[in-house]
Image (cartoon, helix red, strand yellow):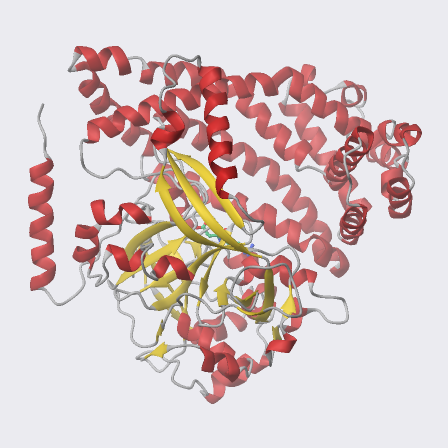
Amino acid sequence: MMNYDWLFRLRRAILVGLVILSTTFMSVADEGMWIPTLLKKYNMDDLQRLGFRLSADDVYSVNHASLKDAVVLFGGGCTGEVISSEGLVLTNHHCGYSSIQSLSSVENNLLKSGFWAKSRSEELYSPSLKVRFLERMEEVTDKITSNLESLSKAQQKEKIQERILSLTQELETDLFTEAVVKPILYGNQYFLYVYKVYKDIRLVGAPPSTIGKFGGDTDNWVWPRHTGDFSMFRIYANTDGSPSEYSDDNIPLKTKTFLKIKLGKLEKGEPTMVIGYPGKTQLYLPSPAINMYQTTSFPTRINIRDIKLSTWKNFMDKDPKIEIQYASKYARTANGWKKWKGAILGLSRFHAIERKKDAEKKFQLWVDSEPERKKSYGSILPRFDSLYAQFAIYNERHIYYQEVVERGADLFQLSTILNSFIHDKDKGILVDQTSLLNKIDKFYNDYNPVVDAEVMMQLLSLYIDSVAPEFYGKSLYKIRDKLNDKYFVKKVYNKSFLLDKESVKDFVVNYSRSERSKLTKDPIFKLKYEMDQTYVFTSFFKYQYINEQIEANQKSYVKALKEMNGRTRFKVDANLTMRVSYGSIEGYSPKDGVIYRPFTSLKGIFEKSQTDIMDYTVPQKLIDLYKSKDFGNYINEEGQVPVAFCASNHTTGGNSGSPVLNRDGYLIGVNFDRCWDGTMSDLMFDPQYCRNIILDIRYVLFLIDKFSNAPNLIDELEIVQ
Ligand code: ARG
Ligand code: GLU
């Protein structure tokens, strides 16, 4: 068997030599979200080539404090970093958003005004916010998968779940230790992660939304960017440093280690490292899957969301109250919608399907070149073709169901909440009534019946036009011809008791089984319930069944690809575990004749504020600081306050809030987004276009120091000039 390992090594050695000889940075965009414990084995050449002066041990070690001890899983799906010896954590504004919102009231809207605790006693406890520190991780493939060959697939699955449960339960010796086993490479390998969970987390500060969300949806996914997307929290613990529930007696956590901050010049081509918790990528999909995303899944979702977004927008533009009520729903819905649009363009520009097909040809040649291989792997690609052909219709229906029913009209979502309420009640499962009533209050705060009836009508009409009648459900079938009649929809709507907050709360508080039919006979609830049932029985089981076979085939495919790849490193999809991405500060050319510089500054905020776009409203104080040039030493070579930069790190959702480190491991920025032209990188990484967007740490410090007058926090940091 031919092995080209020596060739790779030679090529690398030459590249490393080049870096040593030249003084400027070699800029190389780098695909991959690497596993911290495997850096030593696979990534050190790359790190040196890019100019990093860090050892693998500096990044991850269990024997001494390392960078990994300063990076936390923030809440359920963001990253944060510890930046002081007293538990101060930095993350994005959009990651702290819901905590800040919960701590706000109409009279004291912290999102609007911003918030800075001037002393520890003013820091605000954020219920239900957690941060997790990774204590250790290790591969446990043998423990989970050994001696299963004789069992059936179903038995294997069961056994694996059993082993995972017994392994994690054994390790979870208290309420603040969490053990998680996660598969990588579609279950070819398993890793164990042990976390320490801190639950007393307090808000320290956040700029007003006009800074923290500057640019809003207009600029979301967009470069050049000027969002001051950060917020700060503090971890509190027992006096001995162990985690605890909230208590007045808790003190700021004395952290094992924290990130030191580097102020000073950033250069194009300079290496950048992102350590964080990327959520999900699918880098090994075959061509029929890419085809499905590019031509069906993404366009269908975009199409449905177009309707939701434009309907909301119509109302929002006319009524400021509705604008506030639907702002967050709009942002959430628009986030994926815009990302997928970018991904479709990116995949087509990259000739993604052709590239995958070329790679598949090479794979097939490799498979066919040995009889043993042919026997084990020969049917993988044809099987994908046939599975995806069968899957198409179920996939499409799944998308319609998700976007129109599950995440459809507001009252459909309320129906889901109430359905699980009566289910739990009837089964005697304990229901947290206070939190349910709070949820219901929050629902009606952000709800307008006229807007929602219009959304419902539009979405159901689309459903009827796009999905075959046998998938409607009885009620929808009955009203199928009358949906365009606005009066009719309102009539259905007005018969529903879900329209009235007090009746719904009353239903919850006084529920008994005999009251059940009040809900189950409600026209909106019934419509939704029947659509659920119809979907599950006609489509979902089939969807799941084919999906399982696709996953199993994907497991064999990745196993074979890894074998074909030989002993060299192999990239692993993101799965919301700690990863390291490296790259360099790098702009790009989005189209002919245009080149993006990788840096922005306060000047750009001022420029944007001169337009009449609402998302570009800036607080007067920031304009004043800009005009008086009161910048402190938070400036770049041009004498401007830097705001953001972009780089070629491979990142995805979950990487929000991740620390961005320079060649020496000092903090230079906070990751918060990707550039629109490169959002395809969840499926394929195009080094020419895929860029992450980073908040410059100098802007963060400038805002804390000059804008928010919180010098107490600056004193807490360790700053390297
Ligand atoms: N696009 C970023 C991320 O996926 C930021 C989203 C929040 N910002 C916004 N304007 N909606 O999640
Ligand atoms: N804003 C994203 C997040 O919340 C990061 C952007 C991305 O998808 O890369 O994690």
Tally the numbered discs: 0
**Would you identify the image quadrant in which residue 557 lies?**
top left
- Where is residue 697 drawn, in percent x and y? 41, 71
On screen, residue 559 above or below 181: above
Residue at 79% in and 47% down: 440
**Would you identify the image quadrant in which residue 673 lies?**
bottom left
Horizontal arrangement in the rendering, residue 49 relative to residue 133 (left or right): left
Horizontal arrangement in the rendering, residue 515 relative to residue 489 (left or right): right
- Where is residue 297 drawn, in percent x and y? 50, 31
Quarter that holds the N terminus = top left
- Where is residue 212 drawn, in percent x and y? 55, 67
Do we see residue 299 in this rendering?
A: yes
- Where is residue 111 drawn, in percent x and y? 64, 67
On screen, residue 132 above or below 207: above
Residue at 18% in and 19% down: 365
Q: Nearer the viewer, residue 414 or 485?
A: 414
Do we see residue 393 in this rendering?
A: no
Horizontal arrangement in the rendering, residue 453 relative to residue 313 (left or right): right
Quarter that holds the C terminus = bottom left
